[in-house]
Amino acid sequence: MAQTTETSTGLRPETIRIVNLIYTQMCNLQPDTNVLVIADSRTPTWVVRAFMGGAMALGARAMVAENATPPPPSVQPSIAWNSMVVAAAKEADLIVDLAVGYARFIDDALDRGARVITPGDGTGGHHIEESLIRTLLAADVHALRREADELADAFTQASTCHITSEEGTDIVIDLDSIEGEANDGFLWDPDKGAWKSSWAIVPPAQPGVLLPKGRGNGVIAVDGFLLYEPAYDHETPTGPVFVTIEDGKIVDISGHPLFAGRLRHWLDAQPDDSASFGPVHINLGTNPRAMLTQHLEFERIRGTIVFGFGDSSMSMMLGPGFEPVRSHVHWDLLIMRPTMTLDGRVIVENGIM
């Protein structure tokens, strides 16, 4: 899979188009809205100012809260955030999250009626311009939105999801009473002229499901990446890593000696077994311009599937009666060439949709 390390040395004109697209078409930003842009020290200053200035140009009241760069994404559930940022979030109508991702204070903001958009999947970073330009301007985001809605409906209507791969994946997910999620990056549906979500991740799209405890059985043959911490962040194995799941919990890890060994060592070092619970979500990447880069856009590579493990208690989309996993970490696996069926209907075959 192609990779890129391109970074900018100044504001790219396309970034202004990106910011306007996000605000006007994805957020339906209205005058006098209180907009809080949360950034950190790794995100280019001009990108942060583009989001602040873009909001002001549309008549909104905007401010920026810049933080020190946080630890890796896997430990987001246990990060203690700056109390001043937490206080500012209490006044925001729209939070543009370029730094946080999952956090209890973001959950609290949603509970009181705020909306959250996360360009860069919450973690932002120095690659954000190149990634957003490619995955938003070079892709038809409205076609992705409509497709994601259809796929979300397919997940909702199905009772069983079966995922296999020639590399060795063979896992069955019980979808009984589970609602599909479009995860298309849109807070606002411009076709219907109505709000569709209070929390949206950009770039689009990764339709799928959030799962309560105990819904998966089988083997995942990881050939895409392992996203975990502390020192490794995300890494691409040079041979499959086989993760065996029984009743929603990892019971064995084998395969490539180095990468399987690192993952076993990390899980064994955790203070409890909560990091081994999952999958807590499965998502199908649908963006034809997404690539395997240092940016979290890799979770949208078209035809791939991401499996989440560990914490799901701050998932922002939990319904009544949903039993989440509570953990101090959340981490992910990606497979590149899945075949996925929903009640026997083929959705993706060998990584091709």
Image: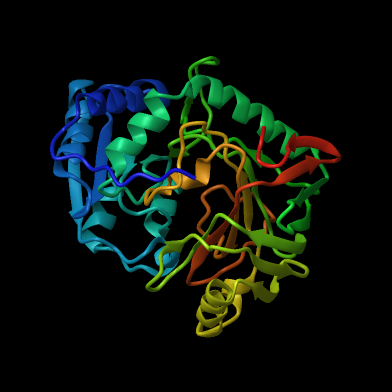
Q: Percent from the top left, x then y, of residue 193?
A: 50, 16
Task: Name the residue nearer the viewer: 256 or 248.
Answer: 256
Q: Percent from the top left, x then y, of residue 30?
A: 31, 22
Tag count? 0
Task: Name the residue nearer the viewer: 5 or 312.
Answer: 5
Image quarter hosting the C terminus: top right
In the image, farthest residue toward the front: 238
Q: Is residue 83 left or right of residue 178?
A: left
Q: Is residue 326 left or right of residue 9?
A: right
Q: Quadrant of residue 61?
A: top left
Q: Percent from the top left, x then y, of residue 245?
A: 73, 68
Residue 212 against residue 122 in the figure, above or below? below
What residue is shown at x 44% (from left), y 61% (from top)?
Answer: 234
Residue 303 against residue 322 in the figure, above or below? above
What residue is shown at x 43% (from left), y 36% (from top)?
Answer: 203
Q: Is residue 187 left or right of residue 42?
A: right
Can residue 105 be seen from the camera position used here?
yes
Residue 134 against residue 164 in the figure, above or below? above
Q: Percent from the top left, x then y, of residue 256?
A: 60, 71
What residue is shown at x 22% (from left), y 48% (from top)?
Answer: 43
Q: How is the image coloured?
A: rainbow
Can residue 27 be seen from the camera position used here?
no
